[in-house]
Image (spheres, rainbow, N blue to C red):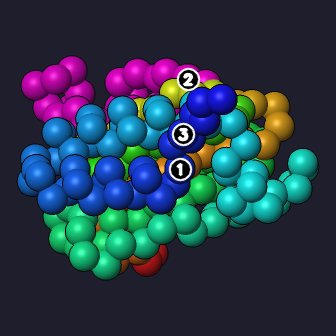
């Protein structure tokens, strides 16, 4: 009887290390990591097993791997999972000089993208404007490059399980949060 190998979190981390070691281009890295994340998402049950998640609840953030040697723009890539409450969201934000890949393990999240509009683009003063939305369903991966502004919303009707890879642990970087209601910007807490 032939035994089929299953893609593991450990194998995924090894692949991510190779991606960071072989390219310094954030776009190339984000695309390659996203493809590997799709492989990991195709393995059923690994996240519940890794985190010992209950069938309901378990809301919060869970560390899966922190790498002190590799990342972009500096060392410290971070693999984590979030168990999101129904309708969980936050203000639009960026990831500073890092990129982030979002993989939906279970449920679905709506991603809304924003950008600044300036005089000459149909506004009298700078304004943060929504540029589009898309819904990530179970098994899908999306990435946001340095400086991109977005907002996530759990639209599952129940909890959503999202695996996220930060090219550098965001808690170590300056990032910004945006409020479209008053076009304000503030530095996010670390």
Q: Is the C terminus in the top left, top right, bottom left or bottom right quadrant?
A: bottom left
Foreground disc of the pair 1, 3: 3
Q: Earlier in the sequence, mark 2 or mark 3?
A: 3
Q: Is residue 134 magenta?
A: yes
Q: Is residue 11 magenta?
A: no
Judged left or right of residue 95, residue 73 is left
Mark 1 sits on what residue? 8
25 or 84, which is in the foreground?
25
Mark 2 sits on what residue? 135
Is label 3 in a helix, a strand or a loop? loop
Type of secondary structure dominating the magenta stretch: strand
Residue found at x 63% / y 55%: 82
118 or 165, which is in the foreground?
165
Q: Residues within 10 Å of mark 3 (few under 14, many from 20)?
A: few
Mark 3 sits on what residue? 5
31 or 5, which is in the foreground?
5
Is label 1 in a helix, a strand or a loop? loop
Judged left or right of residue 83, residue 20 is left
Residue found at x 17% / y 39%: 28
- Check if mark 1's residue and mark 2's residue have beta carbons within 8 Å: no
Looking at the image, the residue that sits furthest to the front is 1
Q: Position of residue 107 (x, y in %)?
A: 71, 32
The magenta stretch is: 111-137
The number of callouts visible is: 3
Foreground disc of the pair 2, 3: 3
Label 1 and label 2: CA atoms lie apart by: 26 Å
Q: Is residue 128 above or below residue 47?
A: above
Q: Residues within 10 Å of mark 2 (few under 14, many from 20)?
A: some
Q: Quadrant of residue 2?
A: top right
Label 1 and label 3: CA atoms lie apart by: 9 Å
Q: Can I make out residue 125 in this image?
A: no
């Amino acid at each position: 009887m032939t035994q089929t190998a299953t893609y593991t979190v450990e194998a995924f981390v090894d692949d991510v290390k190779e991606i960071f070691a072989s390219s310094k281009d954030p776009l190339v890295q984000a695309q390659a990591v996203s493809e590997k994340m799709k492989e990991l998402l195709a393995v059923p049950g690994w996240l519940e097993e890794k985190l010992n998640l209950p069938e309901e609840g378990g809301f919060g953030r869970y560390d899966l791997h922190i790498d002190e040697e590799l990342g972009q723009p500096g060392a410290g890539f971070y693999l984590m999972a979030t168990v999101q409450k129904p309708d969980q969201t936050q203000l639009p934000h960026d990831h500073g000089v890092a990129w982030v890949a979002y993989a939906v393990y279970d449920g679905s999240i709506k991603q809304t993208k924003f950008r600044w509009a300036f005089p000459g683009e149909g506004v009298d003063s700078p304004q943060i404007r929504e540029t589009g939305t898309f819904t990530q369903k179970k098994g899908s991966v999306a990435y946001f490059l340095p400086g991109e502004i977005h907002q996530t919303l759990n639209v599952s009707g129940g909890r959503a399980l999202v695996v996220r890879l930060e090219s550098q642990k965001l808690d170590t970087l300056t990032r910004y949060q945006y409020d479209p209601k008053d076009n304000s910007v503030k530095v996010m807490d670390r």
